Structures are given as structure tokens and as C-alpha cells.
Amino acid sequence: MDPADASSLPSPAPVMELLNGFRKSKVLFTLVSLGVFDAVAAAPGRAGLTLPALARALSARRGGAEPSLDGLGRLCDAGVALGLLDGDRGAGYRPTPLAAAYLTSDAPCSLAGYVAHSDALLYRLWGELEAAVSSGRNCWAPAFGRDSADIFASVYAAEGDVLRFMRGMHGLSALSAAPVLTAFDLSPFTRLVDLGGATGALAGAAAALYPQLSAVVVDLPHVVDMARAHFGSSPAAAALGGRLSWVGGDFFEPGAAGALPVGDLYVLSRVLHDWEEARCLKLLRLVHDALPLGAPRAAAARPRGAARHPRARPPPDAPRTPAARRPGGALLVCEMLLDPGGLGPPEALLQSLNMLTQTHGRERSLAELTQLLSAAGFRRVQGRKTGSYLDAVIAYKTRHAPGSVEEAEAAEAAAEAEEAEAAAEAEAAGAVEGQEAGAPRGGSGAAGAADAADADGAAEAADAPGGGA
């Protein structure tokens, strides 16, 4: 090609970045796998570890021979170039603040477990992406020679595999918990049931954010045993004073409906994307049946004028449930939401391919989740992009699941009429009480006005399917 013609082409930099992306991933994977970040973080003082000292430390940690100084030096220098390590071979290597926060194994929000999981499993599954695209099925058989039907039997093949996977999911849950748990006002609920919640990271964060809430995690019995042993005695869990617990069970087993714990808020976090529509619908109907029926009830227990707990305050634009329409039960779904056109965001599209390589499911848009939730009997579905790793969708059980769309509409109309009547009665009672006490209706001063404005706004938001997506 004539150089003059080449100069008119777009820059190849984006293609080269994609082409070399796997090299950067393997540098990260190998630094974690060898224990480099843990070793340099444990070094006394701020000088870090020289290359020979690091090689000795890695040998002591892992057992066996020391890694070659040439190979280890090249790896660590690449880590410096990628912003994961500071220093050099002579002065010594230190973790950058980024690595200290996310890549040391004992950091509160450590992603080291997920890095290890990605290295051991996902990297090999993605190596069979072409096979997955051609067949439309996951890659467990070509990548590992394992049965592709029961995906979790493959993930949980050995105790070490289970713990590695759990640590990976724990780090991701810790990072996304607060955004998804404050996307909506969860203060009306008192008992959270997290199906497939493994380590309890999300359930524990919910109990910490909402002091009125107790939480129970349901997972496979051997997963629950490991969660209690490795995560149940953590300082964060201990600080909850018994408001976090685990129950063993398989919610896909026959008869699971009657065995699910009682709760008024169920959570499915990164569960629906594992399964095809038929199995998702089965699970959603199971949850719908387990939830209490919605009914109007009295105003929130928070005393008039009292502030919410500071850690439980949702963002200013979060929809709030007005006093006359407190829900009986709801489901919080935490997943990556595809854009309405299905062409973004890139992270969700890549995650959907990730699901193709290893599960029977995919990522979905809010409209697709709304369709599934509505088919299971849920109403008033709302979704929110959180800006974090996961987005949030909430759906309410307002009446028993109807048998047809016409019955659904009739049930909703009857529910609206009931709730409007209850609201009118509550307002009349409040007016009488306020006149007797000599106080204006709706509270006093700015606090009462704010409460009333929040209630009016939430009534509109709650009735708008997909509001806030």
C-alpha cells in the first residue's frame, strides 16, 4: 500500500488496544496468582521489596522454588507500566493505592478472588467463544470436558473451586451493594431473603444500611456451610448483632415453595442472568407465591419529623412508597441492564457473552425483565441504572397472580380503588387528629411539607412501569 494512502486511514490504536487486551489481563492474573500484591503489601516500611527479596517472599508463601529473576522482573515492570505497582527492580516494588484497595486478598473490597476465578475458569471458557457462538451453548464441555447441563456442578466441582468462586462474588457484591440497595427506598421492609446470596455480602450490606431490616441468605447447603465458616464471623457480620443468617436449600427443587423463609423483600442478585426464560419464570413465580400480599396499611413507623437513619437514606430522586400504599411484598432484582435498543452499554453486552460461555442465560433490558416479572404476577416494575457494576429493578406483589391479562387489569383496578378509599380515610383521620392537637395537617414546618411532597411524587413514580430506568 502506498504510504500516502495509509495516512488517510483511521488510527489503528483502538484495534491494537483490543488485540493486546488479553496480554494485560494475563499480567493482572499472574501477579495475583503468584501472590505479588500480598507480598509487597506485607513488606515492612515504605521501601517495598527488591526483586531478589520478592522472589524469596513468593517462594516462602507458595512453597517450592523461587521464580526466575528475569521473568519476575519483566512481570513486575509490566505491572508498573499498567499502574498496578510502584518502584523498580533496584529500589523495590510497592502496591499502588489501586492495587492495595482491590488486589490484595485481605482488602475489604478485594477483587483478588474474582481475578483468580477469571484466570482459572473464565479465561479458558472465553477461549472457546467461537464454539459457544456457533452452537448457542456454553463451553464447559469443550473447555473442561465437564457436563454443560448443570453449570453449578461444574463451578462447585471441588471445595477450593467453591471458595474461589465465593470470594470472587463477594468482592463484586461489596462494590455494588450500596448503589443497588439505595436505588429505591427499602425502609418499609423488615425481612429480606436473598436467594443465592452465598457469602451474605449483599444481605449484610442491606442490614447495615437499613437498621429495621433483618436478612437471611438461602443457598445450597454446602455453600452455606462455607459461608458461615469463612464469612459469617467477619467484623461486618458480627456488627449486625444477629440480623444476618443463612439457610441451606435448593430453590429449584420440587417443594421449595413451602420451604422458603418468610420475608417481605426477596432479592435475586445475578441469578436471573444464569437461566433461560422458562426457568426464570419458574423462579419468579416461586418468589411471587412466597411474598406476602400487598395491602394498604398505616403510615411509616418513623415518628413525625424524625430523620431517617443516615446510612439508610436513599438518593433524593429515589421513588418512595407513600404511607397509604405501603407494599406487602416486593422483589429486588440486581443485574446489568441492557439499553432499550440492546446495543449497550459495552460492559453489559460483554457480560451477556460471558453468560453464553458458561450458563444458560443472558443479560436483559428493563423491558425484557418487566415482561418476565409481569408474567409471574408482579406489578409496578421500576428500574434504575446505578452507575455501578449492577443495576436495580424492583417489582411489587399487589395481588395474587391472575390467570389472564383481563383479570390482572380488573385486580389492579380493584386494588387502586381500595387503596384510594383507605388513603381518604387515613387523611380524614389525620385531619381530625391535627385539629384536635392544634397542628396543621401533614406535620409542621418544612419537614411535614417535604414528607407530603415525597409521598405525592412516589405515587406517580410507582404507577409508571419502568420509571427511572
Image: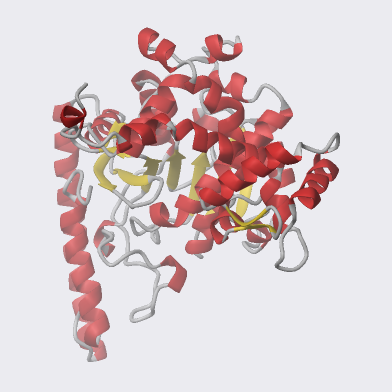
From the viewer's perspective, is 351 left or right of 370? right
Residue 153 location (% of width, % of height): 61, 20
Q: For this view, does 63 lie left or right of residue 469?
A: right
Which residue is drawn at the image coordinates 51% and 33% (left, top)? 23
Where residue 469 sits in the image (x, y, percent)?
23, 47
- Identify the image's colour scheme: rainbow, by chain, secondary structure or one colour: secondary structure
Q: Residue furthest bottom?
A: 438
Residue shown at 20% from the left, 35% from the top:
10
**Pick the front one: 257 or 7:** 7
State which quadrant residue 345 falls in.
Answer: top left
Q: Is there any visible trace of residue 246 in the rendered image?
A: no
Rendered image quadrant of residue 222: top right
Residue 288 visible in the snapshot: yes
Q: Which x, y percent locates residue 465?
A: 19, 44
Work out whether residue 397 or residue 193 is closer to the camera in this orientation and state it.
193
- Nearest the viewer among 336 and 37 is 37
Which residue is at a point 26% across and 58% down the rendered structure image? 319
Name the quadrant of the N terminus: top left
**Which quadrant holds residue 375?**
top left
Viewer-side residue, 278 vs 273: 273
Residue 334 falls left or right of residue 441: right
Counting the numbered discs, the total is 0
Residue drawn at point x = 31 percent, y = 36 percent: 14
Reply above or below: 467 against 2: below
Classify 254 as above or below 325.
above
Q: Position of residue 332 (x, y in %)?
A: 38, 45
